[in-house]
Image (cartoon, grey):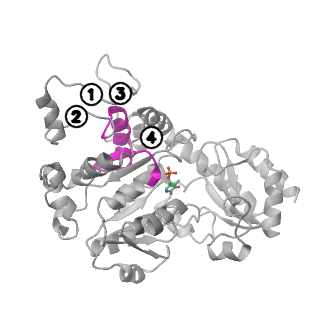
Amino acid sequence: MNYKEGTKCVQAGYTPKTGEPRILPIIQSTTFKYDTSEAMGKLFDLEESGYFYTRLSNPTSDCVAKKICELEKGSAAMLLSSGQAANFFAVFNIASAGDHIVSSAAIYGGTYNLFSVTMKRMGIDFTFVSPDCSEEELENAVRPNTKAIFGETIANPALDVLDIEMYAKVAHKNGIPLIVDNTFATPVNCRPIEWGADIVTHSTTKYLDGHATSVGGAIVDSGKFNWLEHSDKFPGLTTPDESYHGIVYAEKFGIEGAYINKCVAQLMRDFGSIPSPFNSFLLNLGIESLHVRMPKHCSNAQKVAEFLNSHEKVAWVQYCGLEGDKYYELGKKYLPNGSCGVLSFGVKGGRKAAEEFMKHLKLCAIVTHVADARTSILHPASSTHRQMTDEELRAGGVAPDMMRLSVGIEDVEDIISDIENALNAI
Ligand SMILES: *Cc1c(COP(=O)(O)O)cnc(C)c1O
């Protein structure tokens, strides 16, 4: 389909034939029936495509994966049970014990732990670079056994904007792919593949679902990285897979299909991080309004950021839509229509004042979630990071007075008035 983003949000992925349900059906079935064993055998051998067991693939989930694939302008995609599973699969599909990955240090805490603790235990080494590193510094972090570079379009929660083009340039110069987690920007505000990213991941739990109903993840392949040209680095894609009768993914599925087919055939088969068809149905409903919600999240966040920025009790605000923000220029380049609804700020008076401020909020809810329709807020120093001293917090890049505000799609006057009341109370 050559439709624009909004049309894809509503219509892509599922096109009913005459007499079929207008709405994407929930195929709540673990198994699929065949007339002969031979017919089923062909599916097992990856000789023919079709469904046989929902741990590997399911028609409802596949339609939603196809929609996300079209939105990101990729060649193939898959859904997973969480964003954590998506980032793990995306890296593990091309790296194993003895390999190395370069990652921006400004990434989601869960991803940082996955990389630096759990995947390290699997024998994969990570080097974390400053998100603002120069081309030369990034280049210097790459080793002969490096298999990918990783970053987030807009980092959660640091809100740094990734220079995708520069990161892609260094990756390609070294014959490796760039993986970008595009969760906060969503394909409505940025399509990393257009800037050179090879693989895109999502925690669909956030804006794509948009209503805080379902944890989920997605991986999209651009289909542009030529695994065959770098066969020595990626033997998993270019040499026979003995667990699948010796098929060679890059030959069987082409460079457009090799990465996702391998990821499903090996990793989903063995780890089973599959979403339920019902959750995929809810995710699809969420995406149907993504292009309407994102501009509202952005314009509300912009107004809240400007209000905070001009308030005497506010010490600082970080939002790339604010002129003078460290990421204003990169934001203009990669996120010309807006970044997302998440901003961070601090109040004068530090940790104590922040705690007091939070107590007086009524509309803005204190939750650990971000990026859904309802405005929510978190003060790490008094909740998720409460055991840490101010010094320890600062060392970890979290200011003691830092509050992460996820601006929802309510009427912005009500959000601002709630914040104003709470500021007046401190
Ligand atoms: C939330 C988040 C994740 C983890 O996703 P889950 O769906 O919670 O497993 C990964 N990356 C980013 C940028 C996130 O915001």
Q: What element carries label 3?
A: loop
Who's the residue at 56% across and 54% down the image?
A: 340
Q: Decide which of 59, 333 is in the foreground and name it.
A: 59
Q: How far apart are marks 2 and 4 (CA)?
A: 30 Å
Please give the residue where the numbered disc 2 appears in the rendered image: 50
Q: Which of marks 2 and 3 is in front?
A: 3
The single residue placed furthest to the top in the displayed view is 19
Q: Where is residue 124 in the image (x, y as percent from the top left)?
A: 36, 70
Q: Can residue 313 be seen in this view?
A: no
Q: How far apart are marks 4 and 3 (CA)?
A: 31 Å
Q: Give the range drawn in magenta.
A: 56-84
Q: Do the residues labelled 1 and 3 touch (CB within 8 Å)?
A: yes
Q: Name the residue under label 3.
A: 29
Looking at the rendered structure, the kind of residue marked 4 is: Gly
Task: Tell me, yes or no, whether the two marked residues, 1 and 2, touch with CB atoms within 8 Å.
Answer: yes
Q: Dot 4 lies on which element?
A: helix
Q: Which residue bears the numbered disc 1?
A: 32
